[in-house]
Amino acid sequence: MTSMLFYLAAGVAIIAALLTVTRHNAVHALLYLVITMLAISLIFFLFGAPFAAALQIIIYAGAIMVLFVFVTMMLHQGELSVKQESQLYRPAQSLGAILLSTILLFEVIYLLSPQAAVIITPDTRVVIGAKEIGLKLYTSYLLLVEIAALLLLTALIGAFHLGRRHQENSK
Amino acid sequence: MQDQYMENLLLTVVLLPLFSALVLIFAALFSVRLTKQMVAMLGVGSIAVAACCVFLIKLHFSTVAGASFSHSYANWIEVGDFKVAFGLYLDALSLVMISIITGVGLLIHLYSVGFMQKEPDFQRFFIYLNLFISAMLVLVLADNLLMLFLGWEGVGLCSYLLIGFWHQKTVNNLAANKAFIMTRIGDTGMAIGLLLMFVLLGSLDIQQVQLKASELWPLATESGMSLDLVTICCLLLLAGAVGKSGQLPLHSWLPDAMAGPTPVSALIHAATMVTAGVYLIARFHPLFNLSPLAMTLVAVIGAITLLIAATSALMQNDIKRILAYSTISQIGYMFLALGAGAYSAAVFHLMTHAFFKALLFLAAGALIYSMQHQHNIFRMGGLAKKLPFICGCFLSGCAALAALPLMSGFFSKELILEKLLEQQMYVFWAVAILGAFITALYSFKLFFVVFLGPVQQQPDSKLSSSMLIPLGVLLLLSIFGGIQPQSLIDIFASQHLLETGSIETIEIMMLFAIAVPIIGVITSWILFKKQIFGSAINSAKLRQLHQFLYTGWQVDWLYNKLFTQPFIKIARSNQEDFIDKFYLALMRLSRACHGLVNLLQNGQLRWYSASLVLAMLLAFSLINF
Amino acid sequence: MISAEQLLFFSLTLFVIGVFGLLVRRNLLFMLISIEIMLNAVAVLFVAAGSYHHNSDGQIMYLLILTLAASEVAVGLGLVIQMYRRTLSLDVDQLSKMHE
């Protein structure tokens, strides 16, 4: 049952991801991306990481995607944008990219297959919950939290600065 | 106490002209306006006082028995054991020289006041002239090699500045450059010679150098024609002397130097500076005595120069160029005398030459002045009645130049010829006699054409008394100046003499020598009467000969072909510096590499991401295989 | 049940899809989306590895990735807006001024 669910989720995630990168309409692409996120969230559940799964839905599918959709809505001009995008991306011309990424895929799988064969099948019933994570996070990984906080602050300032309108006209 | 008196006098002589030059320079720098009278007072006055001091020195020097006097005033350079002092050295030779310099210098300064009256750059002229006098005095009074070289270069500089005095004209600047560069060739040789002597003998003091030289290098005996160290030293010094005195390989600057004002030609390019070479060799005569080869070379140079310059002078029609070539020729006589070991005769001729050549130049200047800057002798003529005084000056000057009996030049030239005979240098004697004949020919050609020829142009300007007085004094000097200072004979007395030829032959030959100039004058008169001078030449061969002699044996053309053109060619071929080629190639290579790398930096984000992925692929494949 | 090989294959496939998207798209917004997919692929790997070892470190790493993604998106979208304002297009090929 679990493996079936995994295959299903994995298949959905991969197909949705493929659709995401090939869409002309940004809004469609984002919706497919949300589907990918949800599928990955399900996989997290299957691995016994309910906290991560929840975060995946709340932050990724929720907050970050909302940001994307926000910007897309701001810049999207309906049919015009789709037409422009179809000028920019033609599936027929993506042969080189397909070739490169396929080679990459096979190479990495070839590289990692010996290690992968050694690893035993995980026990999915063992659940690592929010409590364990929280305990570890605020004891041994405290420095990491602070660094993350700093990173977020930097991003905040950067985003604020970049998002400002030009002052050239007023000057 | 007595020495104190001497020291001060000597220092005054050297520093006074320098002082007045400096005053004039600073006046010009701080734009203090001086009237021409003030400039003249300062310029001429300083030389006059210096001349008086020289006179006092002369009186004092003859009473004090000492053969020489030297004193060092201050240290110039002091590094470890190496010391160079500001020292002055006075003996009979330098006494004669400073007398000529200040005496003739004073007369020429006085003359310049009149001659340059209309010149706007009056002050600059006197600055240069005073600077020259002081440098020349340093040169002849120096007691060490470095001081001597300082004076030597100083006079070279002033000569350059004065030749190019009218610098608005390109020709004058070119002449100045030519003079400077050609003398520089000799000066380089001389500087090397001075350094060599310092290295070999370990001293810069002229007297010590000569003492040590005679200790170190005993006189070469029969096999004396070898190229030993002393000969090399002498030859290097000779190079300097040849450059400065306008002798054979480096003489072609002197005729062009006539571009300067006439008083300058008289002072620098006839009376004083060009004789510095003669002075140098006379000063180093103990050294030259040690090297028979160098002595012979000096004589050979003198003889050849004397003939070439005399024949060139014969064909010139510019009055100043005639005089310039005759100067070269007369200095050739001096070199001949030096080469024969007749130093006192050489210096004696130097002295008389200074008198009569200054007279000739100043008279020529007066002539040019009153003929509205006419230089061509064939455009003048019949001036004997119009300008009787100038005519008299020229007559006595030419007579002295041609060494007619009882003129000053006669005594000195006959002395040289006699010494040549005593040394049994018969070939040189013959050359000198031939030279004397040509000298008489061209000097009287000049006189006849200018003063007795058909009337061509009227003189106009009146000559001021400041020009006439120096002429009068020099006129007297060139007639009666033929008295050899006894002291000169004394200081060169130590020279070795070969046994003389039989007295009778010498007397006969001397009579012949006396007769030759007179024959020359008569020939000149005959040619003049037949109107050969200045007439058109019909034969093509003769015309070629005339052209050849007129251009001074085509020396300029020869040097141009031999040195200038090849040098320009070499410079051209290396115009794009071949060492640069390597660096240019390096530059092109790095630029090409830059271009290659630049292809990656094309600003296309997708290229960057693609290359990232590609690099990832390569890295993984490296791990894999 | 779920073998490590399968999981690895899934994660790598997702990552390569992201790489493909990054290579093939010229729209800056889509490139950002591709990067999100790649980040997710790595996140899956981390969480899976954590559960293999019964260790919470993997999820902590995931948290960090989440933070990173949030920052990156904030800055990246700021850049997207700025670029759109300047060039009225999201074509990254037009941003080659640095070349000159």
Image: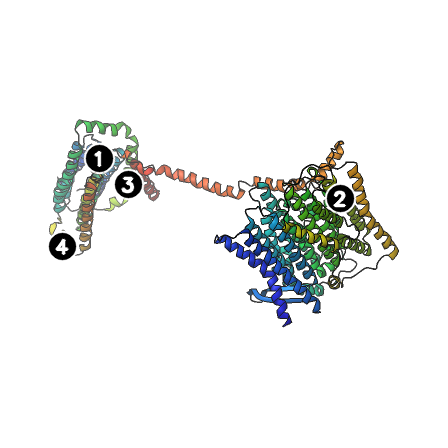
CA distance separating discs 4 and 3? 35 Å
Q: Secondary structure at mark 1?
A: helix
Q: Nearer the viewer, residue B404 or B308?
A: B404
Give the x, y percent position of residue C35: 22, 39
Residue C48, quarter of picture = top left
Q: Chain of mark 2?
A: B
Q: Give the residue type at disc 2.
A: Phe
Residue to which mark 1 is pinned = C84
Instruction: Report the residue marked by disc 2.
Output: B444
Three-letter code, disc 4: Leu
- Tell if the residue under mark 4 belongs to the same chain as the one under mark 1: no
Q: Within 10 angstroms of label 4, few (less than 14), some, or many (20 or more) residues?
A: few
Residue identifier under label 3:
A108
Give the CA distance from mark 3 to mark 1: 36 Å
Q: Nearer the viewer, residue B482 or B497?
A: B482
* Left or right of A86 on screen, residue B209: right
Check disc 3 and give the amino acid type. Answer: Val
Type of amino acid at the residue the image marks with label 1:
Tyr
Q: Position of residue B384 (x, y in %)?
A: 72, 43
Which of discs 3 and 1 lies nearer the camera? The answer is: 1
